[in-house]
Image (tube, rainbow, N blue to C red):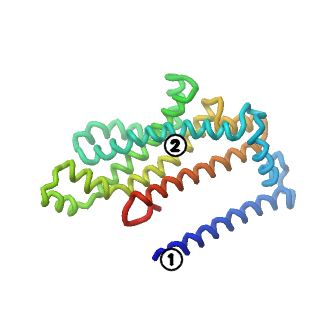
Amino acid sequence: MKKKQGARMDKYLLVSVLSVCVGIFVWWLVTDGLGLFRSNVLPSPVKVCQTFLKKWVEARPDGATLLQHLMASLKVALGGYLIGALVGIPLGIFMAWNDKVDMLVRPVFDLVRTIPGVAWTSVMVTLVGIGYMSKALVIFISAMVAMVINSYSGIKQTKTVHLWVGQTFGASNWDLLTRVAIPSALPMIFTGLDVALGSAWTTLVAAELLASTRGLGFMIQQARGIFRLDIVIVGMVVIAITGAILSSIIRKIGDRVVKGGRLR
């Protein structure tokens, strides 16, 4: 079984690498290869790679290197994300487990969940100013919503027969929650962590476009203003790669925590 899973993963990795290579080749073909697009309209992959390497050591034109922008974005994203997890997961669990908590919290939550995370940016900037806290709070709201929804769904999907068996053996309400409901909800909870990570990362970049002095979103905004599309694409690539790495880490942790299966 493990050999089959390993072969499938190797095949998936090979196909993924080939598809990326084909995409880069097509990109090169329509730019440097055939000259269908001018460099100021669509920079070639060669130009983007050169800019990527330069930006690691060069602060121009936005006042910070690529690593400094990346670290600024990660600091804000992970801070808001972790707080969202600490609040969102327990809140979703207790909303699903306790009808009184559900009745009290759900009306407010149903209103908050319909508001896009980036829409909170102006409110937070007004309340706490442009800086770390405003962006972290926006990300917290965005990440928390996904975690509440998935934690809530995971607890609600607990099989009734498992609860009956626990009650038959004299398990308390707390035992049923911690030993039956939460373990069975772990796949959904980790899916929520993965979804919330993508939501937090996307919201961060959007927030940085509006209220920031450093970060990948700020870098993209500054580059767009001076028509440096090569820097814009570098920022987009770094965002994509960083998001994929963070998502992979969450899934690896989930694979170890969730027994009897793999998260997809």
Q: For this rendering, which residue is in front, 150 or 250?
A: 250
Type of amino acid under label 2 = Ala
- Counting other residues with Cα less than 10 Å from the Cα at mark 1, is it few (<14), some (14-19), or many (20 or more)? few
Name the secondary structure under disc 2. Answer: helix
Residue for badge 2 = 200
The correct choice, above or below, for 48 with respect to 77 in the image is: below
Considering only order in the chain, which callout, 2 or 1, is on the residue closer to the N terminus? 1
Quadrant housing residue 107? top left
Q: Give the numbered dot on residue 153.
A: none
Q: For this rendering, which residue is in front, 111 or 158?
A: 158
How far apart marks 1 and 2 lie (CA) works out to 35 Å
In the displayed structure image, the side of residue 205 where residue 27 appears, left or right: right
Residue for badge 1 = 4
Q: Report the quarter where the N terminus lies.
A: bottom left
In the displayed structure image, the side of residue 240 where residue 192 appears, left or right: left
Quadrant housing residue 103? top left
Tell me what residue is drawn at x 58 percent, y 50 percent: 243
Please tell me how many numbered marks the rendered image carries: 2
Type of amino acid under label 1 = Lys
